[in-house]
Amino acid sequence: MAFGQDTIEQLYRELAGGRHLSAKLQALLEGPLDSRGQKEAVDVSRELGRVFMVSLYMLKPCSNSSRRPGEVTRTAPETRTDDSICLHTPARVKRVRSEEVLVKNGREEVVTRTEIITPSPYKDGYQWRKYGQKNIQDSNYLRLYFKCTFSHERRCAAKKQVQQRDAGEPPMFLVTYLNEHTCQQPQAVLGTPNTAGSSPTTSRQRQSSFSPPAEVLDLTMNGAGLFSRLLLPHAVGGGGRGRGSAEEEAAIVTCLAAVISGGAAAAAPPPLIWPTSAPEASQPSGVDVPAFVASAGHSPSAADESVADEAAAAKMADMDYCFGQYDPSTFGAAAADHRVLIGDDGDVQRVVAARIADMVWPRYTRDTSAWETAGTSSMRGSID
DNA sequence: TCGATTTGACCTGT
DNA sequence: ACAGGTCAAATCGA
């Protein structure tokens, strides 16, 4: 199963969001339900259903099962010859980037243009403000126009257009990003690509969108490094807090690791970069541990090693790149909480893990209205 | 009350 | 003239 970086991004967001929706639904149902609570529960349930639908769709197996065990899955997706419909092939989630020179008021302006086809056009980590929508000729759907939230105060020229392409399950959207973000969000400091995404936000989220210097990290680190460590159960375990227990965190990380690892993991030995032994405390009881995690103590033969190493390195490089695309501005002040959860020992990898976790959860945990109101209901209302 | 969204009007390029 | 893009007053909602 060849996962593209876009798929991993989306899958991670969807599943992590779904996890919190589930907790939220449970909390709602455990308490007395007035009409408002009931409506909220229905909304959460509906959103949860969508999360499942999108996630399952993304995981839909491809028919290219002819790959040999352990084979590195880095074939250019464009070269696929089977006609299976896989969301994670660039035929479904693709990114086209171009630059055009426009002459405006006698001045030449370089406009970067990135087009993405995705089922999740709104949750991309950036902060946008909707400023218009238009009926477009030859299209059944509205085109929505967004500017960077900081367009005025920081003269950021980044814009985004979202247009639904079809009414499939899930519906696909063409997202066009225009111009680079020039606002001094942490991403600029990091030097990572900055036209990667969007997420309509509220003022509260804006307030938490800047990280202290200690959180300025090099998310562009490549190779078998960052992501591999992020997925290590023992690296993200430990500590704990209230409802979001370490077990839950570990379960999610573990499941995601299994999902992302895909079929190759079952056939290939565990990558050498996997821990040779994980602390017992990191294996939560009652959590299904994927084979490749459970067998982490496996000692591969020398022949295994090169194949596994290469495959693992390739996979991790993909994942690291994938997370390098995230806008760290999303890792808001809430990261502090996750640092408590994950470990506050200054370990860079743990902080990165905290920030990635923070990227996907606070949308619901801290500002549900932002996600549901600004992010989905209003705009979806005009799309659906 | 304030910030975000909506939506009709306006602007610009073809 | 038309379509796409943007503006800004009105409206909404936390």
Image: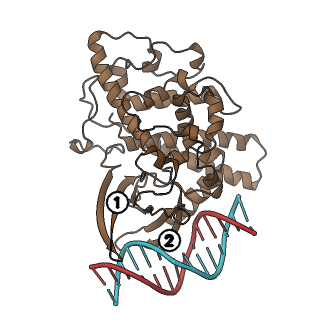
Chain colours: A brown, B red, C cyan
State the residue in front, A25 or A142. Answer: A142
The residue drawn where x is 48% and y is 46% is A189
The residue drawn where x is 36% and y is 77% is A105
* Marks 1 & 2 on one chain: yes
Mark 1 element type: strand
**Residue A138 horizontal/vertical position (percent):** 34, 72
The residue drawn where x is 46% and y is 57% is A182
> Could you tell whether A118 is left or right of A347 in the image?
left
In this rendering, the answer to whether A114 lies above or below A303 is below
Q: Looking at the image, is mark 1 or mark 2 nearer the viewer?
A: 1
Per the image, the residue denoted by label 1 is: A113
Would residue A18 be seen by someone viewing this image from the given angle?
no
**Residue A225 horizontal/vertical position (percent):** 41, 28
**What residue type is disc 1 on?**
Arg
The quarter of the picture where residue A85 lies is top left
The residue drawn where x is 27% and y is 34% is A74
Q: Earlier in the sequence, mark 1 or mark 2?
A: 1
Disc 1 from disc 2: Cα separation: 19 Å
The quarter of the picture where residue A173 lies is bottom left
Mark 2 element type: strand
Would residue A99 be seen by someone viewing this image from the given angle?
yes
**Residue A90 horizontal/vertical position (percent):** 31, 47
Question: Disc 2: which chain?
Answer: A
> Could you tell whether C1 is left or right of A44 in the image?
left
The quarter of the picture where residue A84 lies is top left
Disc 2 residue crowd, few under 14, some 14–19, many 20+, Cα 10 Å: few
State the residue in front, A58 or A283. Answer: A283
Disc 1 residue crowd, few under 14, some 14–19, many 20+, Cα 10 Å: some
Q: Quadrant of the N terminus of chain A?
A: top left
Question: Disc 1: which chain?
Answer: A
Per the image, the residue denoted by label 2 is: A132
Q: Which mark is residue A134?
A: none
